[in-house]
Amino acid sequence: MIWDKITERQKGILNFTDDLNNAIGKTKVAVLGTGGNGNVLDFLVRLGYQEFQIADFDKVEESNLNRLPFFKRSAGLSKVSAWETYLKTVNPACKVIAHDVKITINNTDLVEAIVKWSDIVALCVSDLQAAFIVSRICAKLKKRMLMGPGTSNCWVITTFTHDKGETLESVMGLGTDKMELSKIKFEEILPRMVKMYYFPGRKERVYPETLAKVIKGEIAPRSCKIFVSMVNSAMSWELVKNTAVMNKLPLENTSITEFPVIQVFDPYKGSAFYWNVKTEKIGIPNWVTGKTTWETYKK
């Protein structure tokens, strides 16, 4: 089987036991949004994951070729169709259920069915309303959800375990968690959402005039293969860790990064740290002591 060949060389790496590889092969993953963040699919299929449900309404554009594993001839195809073909090319045994839809308040039943089917959800949408819909459904069903902003220009990831009652909306204090989705004015809260999700150094990685246009929706979010791949790596590794925990397998020398804490590696400064969205404190790990020091970040 090609799956055996795909997983063969990761055997012997810490935590990648036969038990974990087998768990990976049986884990059902929903990837909602198949653009830059959704490129995590390329990582997952090569790790041995082989059961997917994917959703996106967009088509492949030539500008997507800077980060997605497609070709010029793929331009114009639906992203989910291109992904289904790609995943099955890597591993013909993959099971892929593709939904060529935009996630809105009009198809929440479909989203709920996808989340129910899954063992874990990768939230990879760029639309704020879609992110709220997925986040609320995952919280309601107590499904683990991973999130890593693809426009962060660094390695960044967090896991929502939904076992402590904290959600994306409640922690960020947007005042929307009790509101009906149809009543939320997403265009008004987007700048607040973006600002509150600024971990140290994030906004300095995009020129101010460009950032202003992105926030206004005048241009698409900026992305680059180097940094998008870092987010994809972060999300796929976090998904592996969650797979181990969900299957009650040993997880040595690492742990899940749980929201409101975000794990960050800043390639511009070559440093790693944690950021607590709720307390706005920065956690600095010490390799000598093995402890993390938390300090209030002064903007």
Image (cartoon, grey):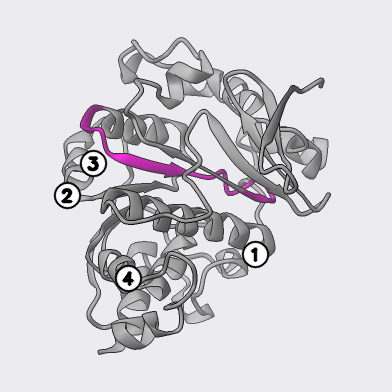
Around disc 1, counting alpha carbons within 10 Å, would you say few (fewer than 14), some (14 to 19), or many (20 or more)? some
Front position in the image: 299 or 282: 282
Which residue is located at x 27 percent, y 38 percent? 143
Q: Mark 2 points at which residue?
A: 117
Q: Mark 1 points at which residue?
A: 225
Marks 4 and 3, Cα distance to the nearest angstrom? 28 Å
Around disc 4, counting alpha carbons within 10 Å, would you say few (fewer than 14), some (14 to 19), or many (20 or more)? many
Query: The disc labelled 1 sits on which kind of residue?
Result: Lys
Q: What element carries label 4?
A: helix
Task: Look at discs 3 and 2 and give the one toward the viewer.
Answer: 2
Marks 1 and 3, Cα distance to the nearest angstrom? 29 Å
Front position in the image: 183 or 146: 146
Q: Mark 4 points at which residue?
A: 21
Say which label, 1 or 2, has the lower sequence index: 2
Marks 1 and 2, Cα distance to the nearest angstrom? 31 Å
Query: The disc labelled 2 sits on which kind of residue?
Result: Trp
Marks 4 and 1, Cα distance to the nearest angstrom? 27 Å
What span is colored magenta in the figure? 140-155
Residue 154 magenta? yes
Say which label, 2 or 4, has the lower sequence index: 4
Q: Position of residue 275 (x, y in %)?
A: 64, 32
Say which label, 3 or 2, has the lower sequence index: 3
Which residue is located at x 64 percent, y 38 percent? 218
